[in-house]
Amino acid sequence: MLPSSQTWARLLSTVFPFITLIGTIGVFLPAFGWFPALGFQSFSLEPWHTLLSTPALGTMVAKTLFTGIAATVIALLLALIFVVTCWNTRLWKATERTLAPLLAIPHSALAIGVLFLLSPSGFVSRLLSGPMEWNRPPDILTVNDPYGFSLILTLILKEAPYLVLVLIAAVRQSPVTRLLTVGRSLGYTPLQCWLKLVWLQLYPKIRLSIFIVLAFSLSVIDVSLIIGPALPPLLPVQILQWLQSPNIEMHLPAAAASVLLLGLVLFAAVLWMATEFVIKKAFKSWLTAGYRGNSKALMVNSGRSLWLFTLFTAVASLLFVVVWSFAWRWRYPDILPSVWSLKVWGRYFPRVIDPLFTTLSLATASTVFGLALSIFFLEALPQTRNIRKNLVTSSFYLPLLLPQMTFLLGIHTVLLTLRLDGLWITVMLSHLLFVFPYCYLNLAGFWRQYDQRYTQAGLLLSGSRVKTFIRVKLPILLPSLLTTLALGIAVSTALYLPTVMMGAGRLETLTTEAVALSSGGNRRVLALYAVMQQLLPVFFFATALLLPRWLFRHRKDMLR
Amino acid sequence: MTLGKRRTMPAWSYLRKLLFLPIALLLSTLSFAADNWNDTLKQARGQTVYFNAWGGSEEVNDYLNWAARELKSRYGIKLQHVKVDDISTVVSRILTEKSAGRSDSGSVDMMWINGENFKSMKQHGLLYGPFVEQLPSWKYVDTKGKPTTLVDFTEPVEGLEAPWGMAQLVFMHDTSIVPKPPKSMKELFAFSQKNPGLFTYPAPPDFVGTTFLKQAVMELTEHPELLQKPVTDGAFDKVTKPLWAYLDQLHPLLWRKGRTFPTSSTSMLPLLDDGEIGFSLTFNPNAASTAINNGLIPETVRTYVHDKGTIANSHFLAIPFNSSSKAGAQVAINFLMSPEAQIRKANPQVWGDPTVLAPALVSKNDQKKFAELPLGVATLRPEELGTALPEPHSSWVNALEQAWQRRYR
């Protein structure tokens, strides 16, 4: 590559981390009373006093930490159980195939599904109503519960598959079969082999994703709005409510609270690392003590069932969303709608078109940019494993590792001063902030797997880097590019906070509409939006899967 | 208690207000209504009006879709409904814009507003106008019979917002679960003791939830006259003491034992539909009929009010000071206030929001249409709605909400 493009790439690669850092630092100013755009021009501790005198602040903080950490731990355990018990089974293959579309569905759509499934008048309760002789829904807190159990469950349903996906990729890169063979030949049970040999190799590969999940679970807003505790809300929701308060002074404690949120995320991350350290020390002797274990079929089977149950719950809750969109009357305790109708689709679909178009335009634009940038960086940045390059690429993930609320609020402060909020392009760029790291993360794996000898052969035959890239490398990587495209679109479709904050409420996407409707009284219309939220990414994933098959229908080897 | 803590306004801002007033007066006397209106119509053509309004009701959204189509074809105006959860978020955005010096091309052109939000905007000089009394449709407004079209939560309107619809707090009950509804706060408590878990109300600061608090405090306090004055710490404790005693006793008897509350009055409809609760409450006297029509709640639901009356108010349309489509917004508001649009809005099959117009003031033809409006199956006749109680002074809203959150969250 030419040195100039390398310099460019270096320069450009600092833009996103830079913006994120500016946002994170920027939020400290209003947190200490400095927000000239709103007329606050002196530093003070007043925002912190207001924050600390908030009713039930301690409860909110404790619950935010509890839900975030619990969701991450349980999701990771589930993912671990999956790889240990399902390796080399049909369930593994089935999971590989169903995972991508499941992951593509926005969190908020899944939360709506879980709401329909688990609420006291939800499907589970309807099934139980016969045997339990309930005429009315039971008066129990199953969703929006004060401890956030329903929120934790929803997060697990979404994050466990994500960690499984990452683990599957890690398994592919590791010599699992060889490790298992060695372990078993020494008399260890498969379970002991996994825990003592394979897991130690897998864990470092998925560590980044774990921290992404941790930061996300601690700072999630849309899911929490739909299914999280309401009284008091979790800290991120409270921040959003303050930002939206008619009392403009509340901007300052909101900024202070988002600094606190940043502190919570950092605290949780440090806690996590400390736990890693302790576990490493504590289990050292266990690792090398030579305990072979005895194989327990029951454990393996229950592990498999647990995973199957997780997948089933997620898929079932999504199906109820679809059923609700075709229901006209569906009262408790009817298990299925008493009156089916297309009225909801006929009447409300025209209204979905505008948000659908906005969603599509934001998603395609940010993803195309994200893809182009990723390819540029992958090609132009030196592919050596030196520390500086690692520093650059790992800084790409900053927006995923820091709480959205914190740096978005800081960025918003700047945009507000420059009057750049509420524009399509602003929202699109804010989406890019999240779409790009996912594109890069996903593509980097494929780029590493790519066999450089193809390019060498191409160069020998054509003598042109550009030609080789376009005619050899791109077609080989086309299926990966298309999946990444679908992934980017899924990420953008799911984004709530950036759209709401940067869009100044002017840009309506399927997700912002669905979240707004979730507090309304019409479950059928809510279901309609949630179905559209599901359809869009699934459509792109299906295209990503089928298009190469059609394009390469005469080139079987391209489809391995 | 930290009530009403406001930043002091810089001196030049007062000065500007002082200068602005005589100029505005001069302009309004000089204006010749008809000519001006034609000018406004001309200016409005081709403008896009961003209308920020609560978007939580499908009936309202559908109605606004209809209005947008009509405005497009008749006046060449593009009415863009920006759906918001809570209009107060928009007030804070406009305030932000003002503080940031954005005095034109603001992000909002028109908004659905009343009460504390109106007061806050008026106080901060965020409203365009006065413009309302120059609109051709103004002459139909029933200012005599509906005094809340002139005074919004004890705050004089002064032509800064146009009355759009009438509201009164009404309760719904499912007659199959609650055949005989309790008609006062005292009866509600007695009822809940016998039938726990059937009643709840939206968590304040949802406006229906806050209205429930106001209704309760009005019925329970021994000093109702203090509610009409700005709140003070002393008055607050005096007036609300029986309220907290009442709620402390009532909450364990509510849905979910009062450990959580619905987020809005519309989110109570699915609960009512499934029989989780036996009641709902709303500010729209037609809401029950409309919801039955739309298959959202059982046909056994009916409406009732408390014996001593319930709180009533009007809701309004206003234009922010920094709107870039003021002409378009005025034309849109004039249309929404016209007999045609008001008749459609009052139809329970469409939205069922009571009109602000006096049927006596509109044309014979329109009078007939008003008279022929169907009365929904669960809608009370005007005489059954009982006494319309005035809203307390708007400063009570924040005080009540804060105190409620401190106690019950």
Image (cartoon, rainbow, N blue to C red):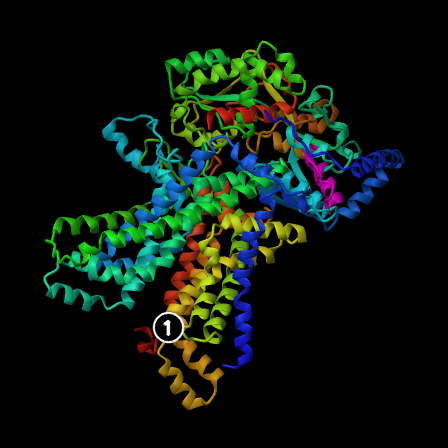
Give residue B33's position: percent from left, percent from top: 84, 36
Residue B274 shows up from this direction: yes
Q: Is residue B122 left or right of residue A14?
A: right
- The image shows residue B399, relative to residue A287, as above or below, that is above
Q: Residue furthest top?
A: B222
Residue B384 shows up from this direction: no
User: Is residue B329 rendered magenta in the image?
Assistant: yes
Tag 1 residue: A448
For the point 62% across and 54% down, the residue is A423
**On the image, which quarter does residue B23 sit in?**
top right
- The image shows residue A217, relative to residue B337, as above or below, that is below
B227, B300: nearer the viewer = B227
**On the image, which quarter does residue B319 sit in?**
top right
Image quarter hosting the C terminus of chain A = bottom left
User: Is residue A137 rendered magenta in the image?
Assistant: no
Give residue B15's position: percent from left, percent from top: 83, 36
For the point 17% across and 56% down, the residue is A191
Q: Which residues are magenta?
A: B315-339
Q: Is residue B57 left or right of residue A447?
A: right
Give residue A474's position: percent from left, percent from top: 43, 76
